Image: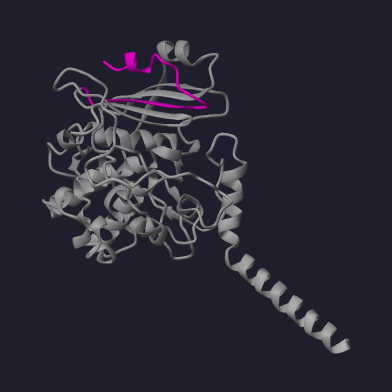
């Protein structure tokens, strides 16, 4: 009997040790998973775990903030925290809620993939056929896989055939939970399975942005966060941005969780509106912006990473939105409107653009 008790005790001890070890090894996942689960908006206010800082540069566009009655009329009495209209020369018509200003740090939530468009605008200069080259030629894991036929253009157009899938934050075997909380963003993205042939079905899926980031990293031979800092953030932003990594010295989340000042998000939008011009520097060849307003052949009104509401030819409006965030870019006038708040934005935002 005593021998049996010893055996049972050892089994319990070993099982408990394995459980504690497994929990400790996956603690970053559980920590983040709970934040996703507990969020009332679907987006955590802050993200625990490993992060990395992307440093801004010294040549950022100077912003001149001024109060505006039209913006105040729209924003007052709503859930708006900041409403801004920025012009190419750095003039910004602004309305801020109490305690908020251009230096306030905000998470871009589902608008984080907006950084991919200006980054790829530069990469296309080095790789002219990049947008239509099958990703399997760069991602060795897919070289002999049917998913290798997907192109970056289809990823931007949300035509990869990869579904969004159900999000179960506390399920460690759920592929979207792995992409949201780790422990390996690249592995989760490469495991994603298609439902439709590439180019045949429109569905916005977070894996598309993560695959574009992974492809950019492989092309440049450096972590995506380093590529983004060197190619884009240090060349147009005034301050630092904080991004989420899956683990120490790991990959950056490209589909969400980029935190930066409101002013620097405006600067990013103005770079897009000006087709790559930052002061006297051009980040990419002029005319590249026209590719972004090319509509998908499958889903009308959607371009390379942006919605394109119906408008006259040559006067396209680029729109990107997420819960509590909306960005509008008018390329013809190099003007942008940014709204930050809770819930859905006021319906009058488009009339603020010339």
Where does residue 322 sit, x and y in percent of width and height? 43, 33
Residue that sits furthest to the right in the current view: 1
Report whether residue 313 is seen: yes
Identify the residue shown where x is 17% and y is 48%.
131
Q: Which residues are magenta?
A: 333-354
Queried whether the magenta region covers residue 338, the answer comes back as yes
Residue 256, x across and y down, in percent = 43, 45
Residue at the farthest bottom position: 3
| Camera-side residue of 96 and 246 | 246
Q: Is residue 115 left or right of residue 311?
A: right
In the drawing, does residue 337 fall left or right of residue 330? Answer: right
Whether residue 227 is in magenta: the answer is no
Query: At 50% across and 45% down in the image, what residue appears?
Result: 167
Residue 140, horizontal then vertical, whole percent = 25, 66
Query: Which is nearer the eye, 35 or 22?
Result: 22
User: Which quarter of the rendered picture does the N terminus lie within?
Assistant: bottom right
Q: Does residue 67 appear left or right of residue 350 in this picture?
A: right
The quarter of the displayed image where residue 121 is located: top left
Q: Where 195 sits versus 61, above or below? A: below
Screen quadrant of the C terminus: top left
Q: Quadrant of residue 87?
A: top left
């Amino acid at each position: 009997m005593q021998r049996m008790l010893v055996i049972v005790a050892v089994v319990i001890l070993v099982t408990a040790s394995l459980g504690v070890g497994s929990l400790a090894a996956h603690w970053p996942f559980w920590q983040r998973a709970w934040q996703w689960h507990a969020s009332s908006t679907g987006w955590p206010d802050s993200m625990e775990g490993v992060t990395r800082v992307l440093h801004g540069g010294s040549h950022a566009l100077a912003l001149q903030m001024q109060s505006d009655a039209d913006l105040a009329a729209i924003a007052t009495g709503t859930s708006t925290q900041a409403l801004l209209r920025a012009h190419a020369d750095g003039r910004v018509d602004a309305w801020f809620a109490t305690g908020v200003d251009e230096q306030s740090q905000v998470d871009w939530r589902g608008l984080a993939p907006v950084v991919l468009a200006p980054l790829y605008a530069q990469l296309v200069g080095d790789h002219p056929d990049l947008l239509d080259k099958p990703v399997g030629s760069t991602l060795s894991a897919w070289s002999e896989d049917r998913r290798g036929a997907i192109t970056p253009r289809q990823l931007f157009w949300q035509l990869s055939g990869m579904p969004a899938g159900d999000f179960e934050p506390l399920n460690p075997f759920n592929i979207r939970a792995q992409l949201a909380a780790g422990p390996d963003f690249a592995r989760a993205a490469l495991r994603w399975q298609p439902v439709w042939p590439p180019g045949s079905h429109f569905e916005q899926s977070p894996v598309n942005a993560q695959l574009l980031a992974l492809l950019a990293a492989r092309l440049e031979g450096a972590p995506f966060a380093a590529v983004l800092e060197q190619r884009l953030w240090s060349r147009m932003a005034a301050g630092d941005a904080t991004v989420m990594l899956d683990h120490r010295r790991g990959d950056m989340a490209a589909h969400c969780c980029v935190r930066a000042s409101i002013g620097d998000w405006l600067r990013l939008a103005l770079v897009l509106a000006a087709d790559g011009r930052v002061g006297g520097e051009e980040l990419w060849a002029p005319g590249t912006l026209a590719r972004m307003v090319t509509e998908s052949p499958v889903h009308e009104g959607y371009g390379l990473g942006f919605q394109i509401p119906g408008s006259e030819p040559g006067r396209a409006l680029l729109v990107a939105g997420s819960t509590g965030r909306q960005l509008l870019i008018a390329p013809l006038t190099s003007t942008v409107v940014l709204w930050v708040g809770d819930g859905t934005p006021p319906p009058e935002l488009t009339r603020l653009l010339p």
